[in-house]
Image (cartoon, rainbow, N blue to C red):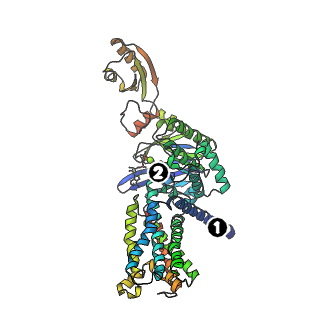
């Protein structure tokens, strides 16, 4: 009977979601205040940004969208690459791997904590923009959508990299940084994509930050490289690809 | 339906064969022990049965649910206590319990009731609001057990539940497990403590180098090697070469010194008793005590796994 099947499915889904939420809550309790997470999630993007912004001759207010996007990138992807290797070392990760939930929910639960963390942190540049520089926001719904999708995308990226089977936080971080540092330069945050050489423009297309940053830019200025709908679509595709890859890797490395 | 059904399980890590064609089944309500030395493949078996690791070949099912294809259903009825006390140091005992319950979809009312009950049982209730970071080894072990029971499992996996604990923690854990058995919970436990296997298990599988070498009730296992019996004897005084001389008596296969006693292994106890009496007489010794002993599970274990006797008296092969 389809009705009982549906009920079974709905129940299954609610179980999966509540287990994912339990993992997210646990991560928030334990890791949000760890010093190395605060350093890589908060100070790192701020100083990185200042280093580039200071030399430039632009109005500081116009830099707010870029600051928001790299803050999202760094903070969203800095929880799981720390928490998962630690949990592997103290064997609590086995608990999650043996729980009655699918790997998709595990990856989602892990990513949720990075997602919420980075949305919280990104409120800082957002507030600075509004309060200090009076930077106008043209489209608030688009801003919220873009920030949420970007945050979730990079949180999932963080969980994906944490699949690397090591108990050493530094190892995951260094691999992750070889990816996320170059992202800043090829995604139109510091250097507008239109001024980049052709090869650079092509590389920019495969960076999720390009679309996140583009959409945040649109929310502020009404101008963007792609229509917002395309940005949304691209970010969703990246999230799905990261999810599936993470799923595959966690399964593969789980000998 | 069997609680656990394992058929021709093989697990390879590269060129290392950790499990080499293992088959067994555990019926509902049974306490089943996996006894083996370090590296025998005990934890590997549990990791496969809980769906964390996948077998190279062979199948395993839990209450009829195939662990590879119906993983979530199989896991729902399990409690898992891993060999490391893997609690969250940064969470309180209570938060650890709640987290574990939420992972297993236990409703709010039920999980609070269950957590209260279990924390009291494991004598952790007074410390429920302290972070696990400050707990002693035994307390962490007990908390790990409590977390494994919070979903009221029908099948409990215990990977070396009491290894390295003091008598009191040991007692609490054994008591709780025997209560569970009365409630009809199936228990799969691994241990290298022979006494523990003997006391707690209905059946024991002896595993060595990834192979099950024997599988039976502890008492029957002892009977299988009736040939290894022993005489325990003590004299009023001992000389330095006593052990050596005793080991050369006729029919003595092996001699060991245990405190002020000597243990002589033999297939023919009455012959050895005669020889010992003669020996005492010629050396002017008085026999203070002499006892015949049947084979212990320890003897079975050493026999079957081909381990060498090293210490004076081995209770646990650690
Ligand atoms: N992930 C892994 N990668 C490679 N080899 C492994 C892995 N896990 C276990 N092994 C090997 O498999 C064998 C069995 O290990 P296992 O942990 O199952 O032993 P055990 O019986 O639980 O031992 P112990 O009493 O020390 O806990 C060992 O030789 C071990 O080195
Ligand atoms: Mg083990």
User: Ligand 1 closer than 8 Å to the CB at disc 2?
Assistant: yes
Q: What chain is tagged by disc 2? A: B
Closer to viewer: mark 2 or mark 1 = 1
The reply, left or right, for residue B283 in relation to residue A34 is left
Query: Residue B70 got which mark?
Result: none
Q: Which class describes the residues within 10 Å of circle 1: few (<14), some (14-19), or many (20+)?
A: few
| Quadrant, the C terminus of chain B | top left
In the depicted view, which residue is nearer to us: A251 or A221? A221
Q: For numbered disc 1, what is the local secondary structure?
A: helix
x then y, percent, for residue A80: 47, 64
x then y, percent, for residue A61: 48, 81
Q: Which residue has dot 2 on it? A: B45
| Residue drawn at point x = 63 percent, y = 41 percent | B182
Q: Which residue has dot 1 on it? A: A10
In the depicted view, which residue is nearer to us: A216 or B317? A216
Q: Is residue B57 visible?
A: no
Q: For numbered disc 2, what is the local secondary structure?
A: helix
């Amino acid at each position: 009977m389809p009705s009982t099947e549906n009920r079974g499915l709905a129940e299954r889904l609610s179980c999966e979601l509540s287990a994912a939420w339990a993992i997210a809550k646990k991560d928030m309790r334990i890791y949000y205040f760890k010093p190395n997470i605060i350093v890589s999630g908060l100070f790192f993007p701020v100083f990185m940004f200042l280093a580039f912004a200071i030399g430039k001759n632009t109005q500081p207010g116009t830099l707010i969208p870029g600051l928001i996007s790299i803050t999202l990138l760094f903070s969203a992807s800095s929880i799981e690459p720390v928490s998962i290797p630690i949990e592997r070392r103290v064997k609590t990760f086995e608990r999650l791997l043996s729980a009655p939930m699918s790997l998709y929910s595990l990856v989602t639960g892990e990513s949720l904590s990075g997602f919420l963390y980075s949305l919280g942190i990104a409120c800082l540049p957002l507030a600075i923009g509004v309060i200090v520089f009076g930077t106008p926001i043209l489209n608030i719904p688009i801003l919220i959508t873009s920030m949420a999708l970007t945050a979730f995308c990079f949180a999932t990226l963080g969980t994906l990299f944490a699949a690397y089977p090591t108990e050493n936080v530094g190892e995951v971080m260094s691999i992750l940084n070889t990816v996320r540092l170059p992202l800043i330069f090829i995604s139109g945050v510091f250097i507008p994509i239109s001024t980049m050489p052709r090869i650079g423009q092509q590389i920019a297309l495969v960076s999720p930050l390009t679309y996140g940053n583009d959409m945040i830019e649109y929310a502020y200025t009404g101008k963007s490289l792609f229509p917002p709908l395309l940005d949304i679509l691209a970010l969703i595709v990246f999230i799905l690809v990261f999810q599936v890859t993470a799923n595959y890797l966690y399964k593969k490395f789980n000998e | 339906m069997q609680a656990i059904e394992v058929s021709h399980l093989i697990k390879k890590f590269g060129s290392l064969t950790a499990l080499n064609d293992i088959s067994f089944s555990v019926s509902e309500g049974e306490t089943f022990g996996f006894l083996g030395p370090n590296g025998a493949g005990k934890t590997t078996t549990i990791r496969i049965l809980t769906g964390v690791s996948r077998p190279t070949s062979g199948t395993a099912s839990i209450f009829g649910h195939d662990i590879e294809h119906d993983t979530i259903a199989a896991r729902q009825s399990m409690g898992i206590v891993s060999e490391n006390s893997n609690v969250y140091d940064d969470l309180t005992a209570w938060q650890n319990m709640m987290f574990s319950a939420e992972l297993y979809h236990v409703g709010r009312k039920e999980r609070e009731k269950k957590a209260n009950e279990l924390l009291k049982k494991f004598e952790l209730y007074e410390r429920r609001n302290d972070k696990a970071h400050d707990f002693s080894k035994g307390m962490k072990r007990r908390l790990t057990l409590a977390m494994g029971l919070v979903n009221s499992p029908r099948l409990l996996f215990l990977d070396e539940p009491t290894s390295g604990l003091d008598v009191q923690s040991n007692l609490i854990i054994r008591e709780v497990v025997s209560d569970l058995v009365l409630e009809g919970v199936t228990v799969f436990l691994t241990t290298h403590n022979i006494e523990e296997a003997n006391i707690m298990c209905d059946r024991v599988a002896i595993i060595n180098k990834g192979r099950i070498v024997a599988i039976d009730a502890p008492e029957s296992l002892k009977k299988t090697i009736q040939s290894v019996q022993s005489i325990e004897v003590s004299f009023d005084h001992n000389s330095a070469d006593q052990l050596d001389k005793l080991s050369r008596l006729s029919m003595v296969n092996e001699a060991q010194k245990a405190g002020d006693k000597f243990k002589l292994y033999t297939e023919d106890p009455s012959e050895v008793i005669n020889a010992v009496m003669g020996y005492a007489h010629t050396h002017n010794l008085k026999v203070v005590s002499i006892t015949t002993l049947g084979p212990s599970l320890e003897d079975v274990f050493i026999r079957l796994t081909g381990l060498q006797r090293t210490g004076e008296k081995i209770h646990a092969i650690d």
